[in-house]
């Protein structure tokens, strides 16, 4: 049976070429809206998305011929995996392709926050030569708490180590010995919070990690802690973070992901001590090419029974 594929988000077009070279036709509709998607999804066997499209129970119910949902990226929290399983729909993702991009973006935000680069850049572009308002903070000698020591967390640690930071970390799976080999002192979360000058999150979003950083935790942290999140929106309680920023318990935050995307409430983003980007962790040419090729090859293998 010939499989019908719909790509419903903007994905590197090398995936289209890959399918074409294997005599597989695909409809590339990156600007399709929700209502249009619901009306046509029943015509397709395979749906390919990134993070904007929500493959929820409603969409899956409309996909009467769906057999596979491919996520061009790592996290699958925009897919109702349980609903897919109930209908026998396979869910595929591409872990690892965006590791370097996400790690580099984490460090970029960390440095931008510490040196107030976005604020200084904006000030200069408005015609001001203000050298007094943007005193920064060095990374050297500071304690960096990395929560989640998977592929991205480890790449972040490798880069942070080059700045002379003291690395402490936690992961529910990794052994102490492995962390030590990476130059990371393995500690419990309760021991990381009071000593870390910086905390960076690199864990998936699930029932256990939702609101991982909330009011109670912020006030267990060292006063003046700075937070980085390039992992998933929902890991941080945004209202509690805003409160902690306003009273100085948290000195700064660098955020790439948000509980609701696209963002509609800009109160947190507009805080003077917040540096924010619109979910750009995987947005490099290299990462998007790798994601597209890996997902395309996985789907081709599945179609040909080579999974």
Image (cartoon, helix red, strand yellow):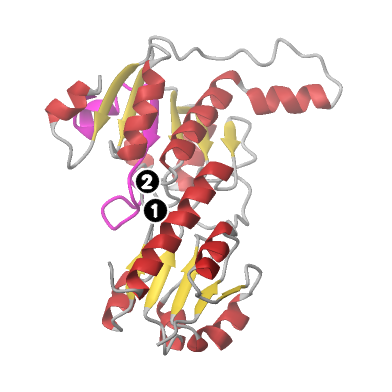
Question: Of label 2 and label 1, which has the lower sequence position?
Answer: 1
Percent coordinates x, y for residue 188 in the rendering: 19, 32
Percent coordinates x, y for residue 304 in the rendering: 34, 74
Q: Is residue 188 magenta?
A: yes
Report if residue 66 is visible in the image.
yes
Quadrant in which the N terminus appears = bottom left
Q: Which residues are magenta?
A: 185-212
Q: Is residue 1 magenta?
A: no
Q: Nearer the viewer, residue 147 or 43?
A: 43
Q: Residues within 10 Å of mark 1 (few under 14, many from 20)?
A: some
Residue 11 placement, left or right of 47: right
**SS at mark 1?**
loop
Residue 74: mark in rendering: 1
Q: Residue at x 58, y 65 (%)?
A: 9
Report if residue 77 is visible in the image.
no
Residue 83 placement, left or right of 104: left
- CA separation in Å, label 2 and label 1: 7 Å
Q: Nearer the viewer, mark 2 or mark 1?
A: 2
């Amino acid at each position: 049976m010939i499989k019908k594929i719909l790509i419903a988000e903007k994905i590197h077009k090398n995936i289209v070429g890959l399918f074409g070279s294997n005599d597989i036709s695909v409809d590339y509709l990156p600007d399709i809206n929700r209502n249009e998607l619901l009306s046509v999804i029943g015509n397709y066997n395979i749906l390919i998305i990134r993070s904007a499209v929500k493959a929820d129970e409603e969409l899956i119910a409309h996909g009467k011929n769906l057999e596979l949902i491919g996520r061009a990226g790592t996290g699958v929290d925009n897919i109702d995996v349980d609903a897919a399983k109930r209908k026998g729909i396979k869910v595929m993702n591409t872990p690892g392709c965006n590791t370097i991009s996400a790690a580099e973006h984490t460090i970029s935000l960390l440095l931008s926050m510490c040196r107030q680069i976005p604020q200084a850049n904006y000030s200069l572009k408005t015609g001001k030569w203000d050298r007094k308002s943007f005193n920064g903070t060095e990374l050297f000698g500071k304690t960096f708490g990395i929560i989640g020591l998977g592929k991205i967390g480890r790449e972040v640690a490798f880069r942070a180590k080059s700045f002379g930071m003291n690395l402490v970390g936690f992961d529910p799976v990794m052994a102490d010995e492995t962390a030590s080999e990476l130059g990371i002192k393995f500690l419990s979360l309760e021991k990381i919070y009071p000593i870390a000058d910086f905390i960076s999150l690199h864990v998936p979003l699930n029932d256990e990690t939702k609101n991982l950083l909330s009011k109670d935790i912020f006030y267990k942290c060292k006063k003046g802690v700075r937070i980085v999140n390039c992992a998933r929106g929902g890991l941080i309680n945004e209202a509690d973070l805003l409160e902690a920023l306003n009273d100085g318990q948290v000195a700064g935050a660098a955020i790439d992901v948000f509980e609701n995307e696209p963002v509609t409430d800009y109160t947190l983003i507009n805080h003077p001590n917040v540096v924010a980007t619109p979910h750009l962790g995987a947005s490099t040419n290299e990462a998007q090419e790798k994601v597209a090729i890996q997902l395309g090859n996985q789907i081709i293998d599945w179609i040909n029974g080579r999974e």
